[in-house]
Amino acid sequence: MTGFLAELSPTALVLLLTPITLITYYILFAPRIEFPPKAPKQTSEQYPVVGALAYFSEKWDFYRRSSRESPSGNFSFYLGKNAVVGLAGEIGRDVFYNTKEFGISQGQALNPRIPGPPELPGFLGKALSLDDDEFTPIFLRFLRSILTTERFSRDLPVLVHDAKEGLRTLATSSSTIINPFDVLFKVIFQLTARALCCNDLADQTELLDKIIHLFLTAGTSYNPRIILFPSLMKLLSPAYWKQMSASIRMYMLVKGILDQRKRSAKRDADPLQHLIDQGTADASIIQMLLTVLFAGIENSGKFAAWNLIYLSLNPKWKTQVLDEIKAAVAKYTTDRTAPLIEQLSSLPLEAWEREFPVIDMVLAETIRLQLQGVLFRKNVGGSDIKVGDEIIPNGAYVLYHNADVHLDPSIYPDPLKWDPSRHLPGNPESKKKRTEFLGWGAGKHSCGGIRFAKFENNIAVVSFLATYDFELCDEQGTVLKNGPEYNVNSQSFSQPDSPAYLRIWPREEIGEGLHEQCG
């Protein structure tokens, strides 16, 4: 060994010894929170130093096994030096969502899922940190200022046009095979950029494609196990540098749009102009716009695609959705001879928000099944927090898995079955307590963008069904009777493990007779 080290160059020796030194120091000297006697029972699935490795590879199965080991259902474990308390059941869920001392942004240190709002390097400018207690209220005020009925009404015609144009050329005369996740992701991205960011990004295909590429690059550059080691160790991770590169390039892309807007005499009625007029610092404008983009896009595009997959496997529900679209159009249209997709432009805002209850149920059921994953908080209140007869130590991370409630057969019978009728008014399953459906958050941590998320989902799904008929197939076009395998241990909300495809063909719906032509 000594001879091997002697043969190394000084540079190679530094590269070898630096991570070894950091890890050794971390193991021997870095402090960690010790669980007190009243903390929930520690899981048996832990190793010295690294903690519970099963968390990374099988989140839901690990969560269930650990919960079953504990008399209360709550449990404790370590990820490296980080103390984590997993909460379960109604009491644990209520504590998780209603405790003001639990910090969301601070909790993300143990949930470094990418894509997510990028933290910007300091040399790019002074912006509010995502970990700053000031950020959340400022961000929510910004959301409230742009998610208004007045703005929705003004933007509606161009949003409907964006969706129509984004879908129009997929199949012109005969059937075409598409990946719905690719298609719907781009449609939703453009709608979100238009409504929550700036028109410049939504109008320029080249810029839109570039930021989508950067978003997806960051999304595939993720090594969750890096949280087991000292913070400086991430500097040795290629995934970290890939993420940082994507973040910087996104920052520079939006900065270029901001600089151009300020240099020109152009004024646009979009969120970018709103922030400029408020006198917001440039770095904070960029941070705010990137954060709202990521918040609006991370799940919505995938939900819309999953809606189509589930509808393709459930003809009864697909027919109900199409009938709902036709009924709404018939109520408001001024030209019954136009194709169905063209008649959508006659729908006012109140129609988009109130005339599609079936689609609302479809979305809710898709969210229930597909929004599976862990949520993190951190106890930053300065003291221990009680949960039943147990305590969560100050400084500990707190974890909850959505499947604990969304796949609970006592709340949702036959929980793996996709069934939008669960959410029908009057159905016992629809009469849930506030924390028994977590698609839009709950308690003190509710989603601030519920209205827009439903609004853009309606635009995307309605526009797709008004333009195309479709069926689930493989990459070669062979019709499939079963959907993608459900991965209960998904690392986060994601696409299917195996690619899913739809065969689509143009729908021609003209006049009151309404007929379909299938290629």
Image (cartoon, helix red, strand yellow):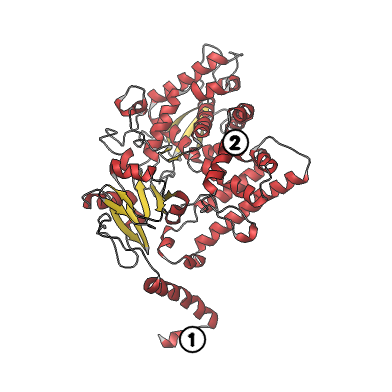
Q: Amino acid at mark 1?
A: Glu
Quarter of the image where the N terminus is located: bottom left
Provide the residue designation for mark 1: 7
Spot the residue most to the front: 383
Provide the residue designation for mark 2: 145
409 relative position to 187: left or right? left
The quadrant holding residue 79 is bottom left
Q: Secondary structure at mark 2?
A: helix
Any part of residue 175 in sight: no
474 vs 409, nearest the viewer: 409
Residue at the spot x=50%, y=60% of the render? 239
Q: Give the mark count.
A: 2
Any part of residue 169 in sight: yes
Q: Give percent across and percent down for residue 501.
A: 46, 38
Q: Are marks 2 and 1 in contact (CB under 8 Å)?
A: no
187 relative position to 99: left or right? right
Q: Is residue 233 above or below residue 446?
A: below
Spot the residue most to the top: 512
Residue at the spot x=76%, y=39% of the render? 266
Q: Nearer the viewer, mark 2 or mark 1?
A: 2
Q: Give percent across and percent down for residue 235.
A: 51, 66
**Alpha-carbon span between mark 2 and mark 1:** 63 Å
Q: Earlier in the sequence, mark 2 or mark 1?
A: 1
Q: Amino acid at mark 2?
A: Ser
